[in-house]
Amino acid sequence: MYAERGEKVGQFEYKNWYFSGKPIQTDRDWNKTRLLGQEKLSSVALLKLEWIIFYYSLGHGDATSTAKQFGITRQTFHKWLRRFKEQDLKGLELKSRAPFKTRKRDISLLQRIRVKKLRTKYPRYGKMKLVSIYKQEYLEVISSWKIQKIIEEDRLYFNSILQQKHWRRRLRSIKKQKITKLIKEKKVNFLWHVDTVILTLSSGGYRYLITAIDEVSKLAYARLYSTHSSRNAKDFLERLVYVTDQKIINLHTDNGSEFQKEFEEACRYLSINQWYSRPHTPKDNAVLERFNRTIQEEFVEMTEADPLFITDFNNALTDWLIEYNFHRPHQTLDYKSPLVYLDSYYQTKVSPMYSSLTSS
């Protein structure tokens, strides 16, 4: 229907007659429209309102120029123009595509009671066995899907199995020495922190940068690997021990899988005490977290070496580590480099972190 002069349609009062089937409003009307839309519409719908305003003002009723202006197709614009004409502002909001009628689980109370009874009687039986027993006892067919949903919703699991899993996790947690229990000493090599930084490749996939830093001297070491297996973590540990001249006393890691199995075995073989962070507590490893940020900002994001090529990346990383340990001033070391600090600490100019060791 066309609107007569002064007649209100939706929220708007049309001041002019329709021209060529297209309504024309004054600038003042569109300003009111925009203000009203800002009160009632979402940001997505407001963008569509700007399409409509442009079409009736600067676009002079030209759908092609309007679509070009906003980088959309003419079909898309006509769709929302039609909805605006039919429903006013509310037509610009996205409609839910969820079906009006959704399928409900057709599980009766009697079926729930029967399945719960069978599950209690046969706690180790799976759903397919319960389907067969249900048919034998109640002369009725029930699907395995229904039995599965009843077990999930009523949590009809075998409690002793869950209890055993809980206690296994509990025992593992008790065995691990938490870093908060360690009485720290201000000695070089008394405590080294180790962690893994995951790098995402531009071509897809990941690389794993294992990092380490000494609590006192801030001496740091890092190396890139293709996987985060405990074998690679063991390889990193052996290199780190070589770099530090086998002087590491305590080692601190998080609870990652790479720091278990072969890595733990290597710690025991090397007589290094292993300490763990509390779960989900990054502040337990604050010193290394800061180094991880530094190595990403000052090396990973700045280097031309692609982590896809591990050897080239590690060679470039070695050069950066030499710069980091020999020359980069550290605020916590009174703006000395780690090597300068070590020289004063040992009262000698011989240091375990010279270039040939770093590149090993």
Image (spheres, grey):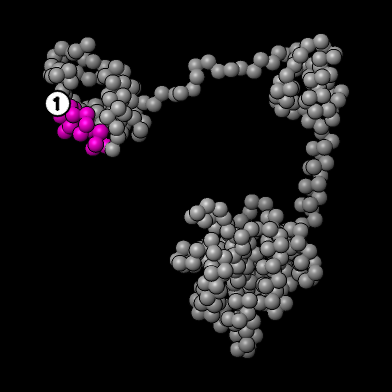
Work out whether 220 lies above or below 260.
Answer: below
Q: Give the tally of numbered discs.
A: 1
Q: Residue furthest right?
A: 121
Magenta-span inclusion, residue 1: no
Work out whether 209 lies above or below 84.
Answer: below
- Tell me if I can see residue 121 in this picture: yes
Which residue is at a point 60% across and 77% down the rendered structure image? 358
Which residue is at a point 80% across and 69% down the rendered structure image? 269
* Residue 132 locus on image (x, y percent): 82, 19
Image: magenta residue range: 53-70
Which residue is at a point 81% across and 32% down the rendered structure image? 158
Q: Amino acid at mark 1?
A: Thr
* Residue 171 locus on image (x, y percent): 81, 50
Which quadrant of the view contains residue 120?
Answer: top right
Residue 81 appears left or right of 24: right
Q: Residue furthest bottom?
A: 348
Q: Which residue is mark 1?
A: 26
Q: In which quadrant is the C terminus drawn?
A: bottom right
Q: Residues within 10 Å of mark 1 (few under 14, many from 20)?
A: few
Work out whether 360 lies above or below 10.
Answer: below
Residue 268 appears left or right of 34: right
Say which of 322 and 28 sits in front: 322
Say which of 307 and 270 sits in front: 307
Magenta-span inclusion, residue 54: yes
